[in-house]
Structure formats: C-alpha cells, structure tokens
Image (cartoon, coloured by chain):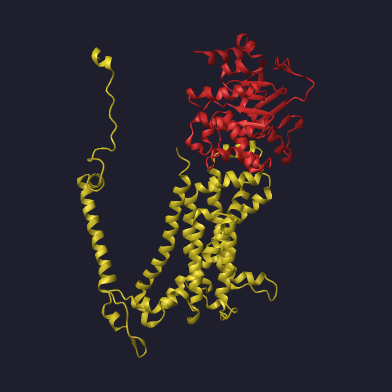
Amino acid sequence: MSATAEMIAPGHNSGETPAIVLDKVNKWYGTMHVLRDVTMTIAQKEKVVICGPSGSGKSTTIRCINRLESHQEGRILVDGTELTDDTRSLDTIRREVGMVFQSFNLFPHLTILDNLTLAPIWVRKMPKAEAEELAMGYLKRVKIPEQAKKFPGQLSGGQQQRVAIARALCMKPKIMLFDEPTSALDPEMIKEVLDVMIELAESGMTMVCVTHEMGFARQVADRVVFMDRGEIVESGAPTRMFEDPQTDRLKLFLSQILRGH
Amino acid sequence: MSQSAAASGPVPVPSRDQPPASVYGPWAWLRANLFSSWWSTALSLLLGYLILRGAWGFFSWGILHAVWTVPDGANGPDTAACQAVKGVGACWAVVEEKFRFIIFGRYPYESQWRPALCVAIFIGLYIISSMRRFWRLKLLYIWIAALIVIGVLMWGGILGMEYVPQDSWGGLPITLILSTFGLAFAFPLAVAVALGRRSTKLPAVKMLCVLYVELIRGVPLISLLFMASVMFPLFMPEGVNIDKLLRAQIAFILFAGAYLAEVVRGGLQSLPKGQGEAADALGLPYWQKTGFIILPQALRMVIPPLVNTFIGFFKDTSLVLIIGIMDLLTAGKTALAEPVWQAYSAEVYILLAVIYFCFCYSMSRYSRNLERLLSRNRNR
C-alpha cells in the first residue's frame, strides 16, 4: 500500500545528502516477512518518530540502519554510504550512528566513566585524558556528573538510560537512533530521560526514535511515521497525524494508546 | 477509623537493629536447624554420635597409637614396632622413610634441593598470579622466566649442577609441571576455540573447532596419552625425538583445551545479546569488543565450572603412570612396592590425599574469593 509519505519533510534542504535513505527495504526472518517495501528518507537534522503496534517492524527498521539486523532486499544508505556486509565501511558507519537501547545495555563491569570513554579511546584513538574530559562534559549535559566513578548496577533506571545517551553522544555521532528508550523505565523516571532527548533534539541532532511517548512526538518530531505489520502505513507532521488520521489502522492504534490520556 | 486517630496520623514504627533473640543468634540457629522437630533432633543426635565416633577413631588410630619412626635394622628398617600396632595404630614411619622418594621420585638424592626449589617457584607463581594487582602484561614475562628457571633447575648441566635426565624426574614436580603448564596453555587455546566455534563469518574455522572438541571429547585421556607416547614418534622424521614429558604435556593441553572450550562457550552463550549489540553500535571492532566487553563478563560468569575443570585436571595428571612417567601418585605406589612397607598403603595414600587436598582446596577457596571480589561492584 503506497504511503502518503512525504519524502523530504518541509523546511529541510532537499539539496543536501539525506542522513538516511531506505529504499524498498525487505527483510525476512526465515519465512516471516517482517519488513515490506519500507521506503523512507530522513534529512539532516530531521527528527522522526516511528510508532506502531508491537510486531510492526519499527525496532527492526532502526536496527537495520546500523546493521544490527541485515536486510535481504532493497538499499539502505547512511550519510550517502550504502550499508553492506563489508566490515570496514560498517565500522565507519557505526561510528557516525549512535544507538540507545530499551534495556540500556551499559557495560556492568566498567565504571560509568569507563563506559563512556571506552569507544572514544579505542575507536577514535583519543588520548585518555581528553576522552575523560569529553565524557565528563556529556555527563554534565545529562545532569549526572557525580556518578562518574560508580558502576551501572548502582544507578537507577533513569540514570542508566541517561548514561547510555551520554555514551552514544561521546562518539559525536551525526545520527542518533532510539529504540523505545523509556519503555523499561518507571513512570517517574521517564520525564528525566525525555528532557535529555528534547534538549538533544533542540541542539540540532538528527534523531530517529521508536517510542510510545506521544507527548514527546508532538513536542519535538518533525515527522511521525506509523508502521503496522512491517510496512509504513501513514506518515506526516505530528499534529496532522494525531488529530486527523487518514487510515483506519492508525485510527485504531491512536484510540488504543490515547485511551486514558 | 476514629477521628482522633486520623487527625494526629499513625505513630511511625520505630526501627530496631536486629530481630528478636528467639530468631537470631547461636541458640536460635541450633534450635531451628538441628533440633526443630523430633525427627530432626533424632537425626542430629545420631549423626553427631557417628561423627564423634569416627573422629575419635581416626584420632586414636592416626595419632594416639601411631608409630612415628622405626630404627634401622641389619637389613634395612626394622618394622617390628609397626607390625605390633597393625590395625590399632598408624605406621607413619613409612612416610618418614619414604617422604623424599614420594615427593621427588628417583631424582638424585643430593640434588633434590633443585626440584624442591621448583615446587617453591610454582607455589610462588600461583600466589602472584592470584593477586589481582599483578594482572598486567608483566605477569606473562614472569611466567616465561619461571618456565625457563624451572627447566634449568630440573635438567641441570650448567652452573655446576649435575645433569639429570628426564627419566629420573618424578613426584610432585612432575605433577605440578604437567598441570600448571598444561592448564596455562590450555586456557588460551580454549578461549580461542570457543570464540571460533561461535564465528559466523568463518565457517572453516568453526568446523575445525567443532571437530577438535568432538574428537578429543570422544576419547579417554589414557588413549590420548598412549597415542602421544606411541604414535607421535612414528609421524616425526628420522632422528627427531620429542621427549616423553613434552609429548604427555601436549596431549594434556589438547585434552584440557577441549573441555575448557565448552565451558567458555557456555559463558559466551549466556551473556545477554545486548552487550555485544551495544559494543557494535559504538563501532568497536571485533577484537576490542571481545576483549573488553564479552570475555570479561563471560569468564566471570563461568568461574565455578572453570575451576571445577581445573581441579579435575590437576588430579588427572596421575594418568601419566600409563606411559611410564612418575608423577606424585605413581611415586607413592612405587614407594609401597618395597616389601617391607607393602602393608602400610593406607598411610601413604593418606599422605597423597593430604597433598592433593591442599592444592585442590586452595583452588576452590581462591575461586570463591575471586567470585566475591568480582561481583562486589555489580550489585547496588
């Protein structure tokens, strides 16, 4: 079903290399067709929220962008470079794409500071003192500089997720991917993480976010993409999507998640 | 609820330091664990009686009525005193007479300070390697230096020490050499094989690793030792002669490596996938991801089965009896072959058991300390 997808969101320079291009991406898990002809273009500095029911393929889509999952058909281009199995180009692409996971995935045997400095030291070959200064800067930005010497097990969920965001930012990526960053958090901690993400969005980062937080989408997103059963059903500006859904599937989804709001 | 109670709010419950004495303290422990019911009390009393009786029996046999030394008679030691207390008291004189043979085998008597020094170096090596602050690259050099020093000490031939051929080596140094260098080489091999088995990009490597593990696990260690001892020379070119101990060492390394590889693979499998994904997302290349993130966590998780395997293999070294190498156990058995001492095998085996126990229990204690140390930081 062809989506009413605007290829480039209004207000963005269509002459620039788009940050991410997905062109008719198809993926199968065995015989299960999980991504069907997914086509999407994300411009530099654009913020896209992907939403949809579980099993719709939204996490799979963003995991394909940094090759945590591989696609079988179609093309994915990140900052102009095509994603293939070639390891060296893959490492280069992964350096420019940061990812924040639902289950934080901090390294529990390293201190917070070591978690943040590991990649800059070993991948960007930064000297240790410089990396630590960089890390402390980002810890201040996510408002937990005093936790630097602790271990992840000693932090709350909200703090761990903010550390995970800081860790991804330490590599100075051009694009940030968020895979349901607040879904595993207690409600009182969701706000602190969303605040960090809002500040990041306002500073001009290109962001692709899979989330159920519609308030966040309304405030920050340039575009909301609704996926269901592996394909993009509808996409558009947040206000338009929430107030004037065109397709029945989106109407059903909105009624389910906005019930009680 | 009455108005006055609600108005002032509920009185907060004071916090106390510990539970009441009826559930906390030594008497409470005894009551709860040993004497909690009639059945439990009866069992505790019965087992207590059996334990005390066994302990008294051993004390009486092993210490009270034991004979500690026998005089030298005309044709060697005069064991009349031992024979007199047979069945009632232990004859530790066999230990006193044969101790040096059991520990050092047929090593020349005057030069036995050399294997003794080797045993001390081994123990020193264990102690240093166990302390976390020495876990640097320097440790590798220390091990290499120790290997060379031990080789020089055992063989001799230079620095005024007489040359002692390998056939004369025996006892505890052999056990320590085989187990220490065996496990020290088997462990990196095991890690490599475990990683190779999980490789998705190199199917040839994966197949090789699977083949290695399944072949080695399919045969008993004894048959591997036989093959090493008998078949190796057949495959070597004319004149090339690998000495017997080295052959046994290689067989041992290959055997231990296969078992340890499966233990390590279990650890790798039980690590949550998210850890590897987070490392990938940061752009960490394979070896750094494996060395900094995957292996530290995976190995930490399998310390119990690893140490289990180490302890088992330490004692498996006694199988080299089959190919004619005299390790600690074999030296003990050979000591008993002398007709005079043939009847006192219990005492010798108790000595061997004590020696093995010291090493194995130290490994066990160390592993528990290591686990506790490494998990200290992970919990809130």
Q: Decide if residue B350 is on the left or right side of residue B215.
A: left
Closer to the camera in the image, B346 or A40: A40
Q: Position of residue B341 (x, y in %)?
A: 37, 80
- Which residue appears at 22% of the width and 55% of the height? B46
Closer to the camera in the image, B93 or A231: B93
Q: Position of residue B325 (x, y in %)?
A: 52, 73
Q: Position of residue B169 (x, y in %)?
A: 52, 75
Q: Quadrant of the C terminus of chain B?
A: top left
Closer to the camera in the image, A209 or A169: A169
Query: In this view, which residue lies farthest toward the bottom?
Result: B74
- Which residue appears at 50% of the width and 79% of the height? B111
Residue B283 vertical position relative to residue B133 in the rendered view, above or below: above
- Which residue appears at 60% of the width and 18% of the height? A217
Number of labelled discs? Answer: 0
Say which quarter of the image contains residue B258.
bottom right
Query: In this view, which residue lies farthest toward the top?
Result: A244
Say which quarter of the image contains residue B282.
top right
Q: Position of residue B86 (x, y in %)?
A: 28, 77
Residue B108 vertical position relative to residue B136 in the rendered view, above or below: below
- Drawn colour of chain B? yellow
Q: Which chain is red?
A: A
Q: Decide if residue B34 is on the left or right side of residue B296.
A: left
- Which residue appears at 24% of the width and 59% of the height? B50
Say which quarter of the image contains residue B349.
bottom left
Residue B201 visible in this rendered orientation of the protein: yes
Residue A112 vertical position relative to residue A187 in the rendered view, above or below: below
Q: Quadrant of the N terminus of chain B?
A: top left
Q: Decide if residue A178 is on the left or right side of residue B374.
A: right
Residue A31 visible in this rendered orientation of the protein: no
